[in-house]
């Protein structure tokens, strides 16, 4: 078992406290191994309290691909067409879809737990908490990540930065995206980057580091089109010792160390620990008994979702070393003898191999979700440099990723041409890692690319859960997003 996963597993399995929750809105109490009265005294208490936040993150990122991948043009639903991923794919999501409520709840559970740590830690004598700054940095990093995802998914959302009562939760208004960026996301990450550790050892490996905070800051600045600050922050990440793995496929070989030179921050999962595994292997795999046997995948109910589109398949050069693991072999697979075995006609005919690993139990995979890895940082830096009229430097960073992929490097051309090349490279390098839809939105390309699939101009964000609108019951402070009423 790997590192921080041991802590998450031990704490979650022994922590079931959910007293005083308002199930209609957000969870207002933290998960812990001890009661609230006893909590928040020692380093271990704060560590355990933060573990509840990690658990919320685990829950949420099981479905992050529905927002980040299937919404875009690289992924599609080929078979089953009555599930949340199909509605996301075809822009037919209704505001009462359970996925929206679950997503909202998961993020606000995380935020509530982080808020409790931040509030309570100031009440404790600092001399008894050698890791006080680290706990604050972790809580703020996780809170910033939650709000960053929330505003990208829903737009304006309630801004909660401290413990609140159930009564107060009914009166929360939706704050503007700009306010949440300025008052929470940016401030939290700027504080986190000076409080977090540069690295961890032992069971703490997997917690956010200085590099994770700086990388997420760079992504935030890029999303805000603040290319100058994005360049500065992402340059700092390149000085912290990260490096691209020589072999791209090693990123998705789950028999090897997950915390390598390219790793920056994952949502961590582990098999065989009573619900601590991820769904990705089962959910993205074709419904083929022969293929499942070949890859050692048991448990049945293979969901055949998140299938590569023809547009993505055709975007890869035949010599691109990323191609095989990113999109697999259309219509089948090659067995141990090199024989091609066709998939059943009724199943999805395309699939990604990025999350394939032997599996003993359905939806209990050890495959992590990569929130940030170094190749993403390199490509974000190339983008910022190009927008800052530093084309030669931009090409240098872009070509680091190209060279590893074994495809021809680029030369300096026009700013617009380099912009398109970077966008394509992000698509090829980061497919099925939750980036494509958000890249389309932040670069203003979403409607142009997705209109033919059913997108309308208001669909750059998703509907707010109908249940939240009904609970507050005041459209002046808590309206539905335009177009979704």
Image (tube, grey):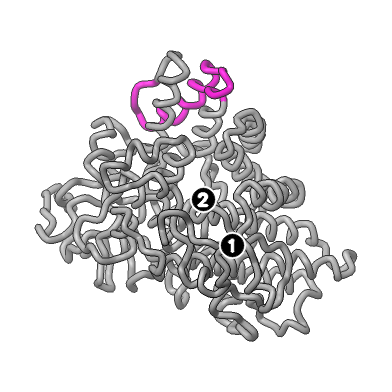
Identify residue for label 2.
Answer: 152
Residue extent of the magenta highlight? 385-409
Up-down relation of residue 211 to residue 229 (above or below): below
Identify residue for label 1.
Answer: 476
Q: Look at the magenta stretch and give its main secondary structure.
A: helix
* Secondary structure at numbered mark 1: loop
- Answer left or right for 136 relative to 324: right
- Answer left or right for 443 relative to 312: right
Q: How far across and how far down the image is residue 258, in percent?
A: 49, 53
Q: How far across and how far down the image is residue 16, in percent?
A: 58, 84
- The residue under the point 46% across, 78% down is 274
Point out the image quarter for the C terminus. Answer: bottom left
Up-down relation of residue 454 to residue 469 (above or below): above
* Secondary structure at numbered mark 2: helix
Q: How far across and how far down the image is residue 78, in percent?
A: 20, 55
* Residue 31 shows up from this direction: yes
Which callout, 2 or 1, points at the residue further toward the start of the chain?
A: 2
- The residue under the point 69% across, 46% down is 182
């Amino acid at each position: 078992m790997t590192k921080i996963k041991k802590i998450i597993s031990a704490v979650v399995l022994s922590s079931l406290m959910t007293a005083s929750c308002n199930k209609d809105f957000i969870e207002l109490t933290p998960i812990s191994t001890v009661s609230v009265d006893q909590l928040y005294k020692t380093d271990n208490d704060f560590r355990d309290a933060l573990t509840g936040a990690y658990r919320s993150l685990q829950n949420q990122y099981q479905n992050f691909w529905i927002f980040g991948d299937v919404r875009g043009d690289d992924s599609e639903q080929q078979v089953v067409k009555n599930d949340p991923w199909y509605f996301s794919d075809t822009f037919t999501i209704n505001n009462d879809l359970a996925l929206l409520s679950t997503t909202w709840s998961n993020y606000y559970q995380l935020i509530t737990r982080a808020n409790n740590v931040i509030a309570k830690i100031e009440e404790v004598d600092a001399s008894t908490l050698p890791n006080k700054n680290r706990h604050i940095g972790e809580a703020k990093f996780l809170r910033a990540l939650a709000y960053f995802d929330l505003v990208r998914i829903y737009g304006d959302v309630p801004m909660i930065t401290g413990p609140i009562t159930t009564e107060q939760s009914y009166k929360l208004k939706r704050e503007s995206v700009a306010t949440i960026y300025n008052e929470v996301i940016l401030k939290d990450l700027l504080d986190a980057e000076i409080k977090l550790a540069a690295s961890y050892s032992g069971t703490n490996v997997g917690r956010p580091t200085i590099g994770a905070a700086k990388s997420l800051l760079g992504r935030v600045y890029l999303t805000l089109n603040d290319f100058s600050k994005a360049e500065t922050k992402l340059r700092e990440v390149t000085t912290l010792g990260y490096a691209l793995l020589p072999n791209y496929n090693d990123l998705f070989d789950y028999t090897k160390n997950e915390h390598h030179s390219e790793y920056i921050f994952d949502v961590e999962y582990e098999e065989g620990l009573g619900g601590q595994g991820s769904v990705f292997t089962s959910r993205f795999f074709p419904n083929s008994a022969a293929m499942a046997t070949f890859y050692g995948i048991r448990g049945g109910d293979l969901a055949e979702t998140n299938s590569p589109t023809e547009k993505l398949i055709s975007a890869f050069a035949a010599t691109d070393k990323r191609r095989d693991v990113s999109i697999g072999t259309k219509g089948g697979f090659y067995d141990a003898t090199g024989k091609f075995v066709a998939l059943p006609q009724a199943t999805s005919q395309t699939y990604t191999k990025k999350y394939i690993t032997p599996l003993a139990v359905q939806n209990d995979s050890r495959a992590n979700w990569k929130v940030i890895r170094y190749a993403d940082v390199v490509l974000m830096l190339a983008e910022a440099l190009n927008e800052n009229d530093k084309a030669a430097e931009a090409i240098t960073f872009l070509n680091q990723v190209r060279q590893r992929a074994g495809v021809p490097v680029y030369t300096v051309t026009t700013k617009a041409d380099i912009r398109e090349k970077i966008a394509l490279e992000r698509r090829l390098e980061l497919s099925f890692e939750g980036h494509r839809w958000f890249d389309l939105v932040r670069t203003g390309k979403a409607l142009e690319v997705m209109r033919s699939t059913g997108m309308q101009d208001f669909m750059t964000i998703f509907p707010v859960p109908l249940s939240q609108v009904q609970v507050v019951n005041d459209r002046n402070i808590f309206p539905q997003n335009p177009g979704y009423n």
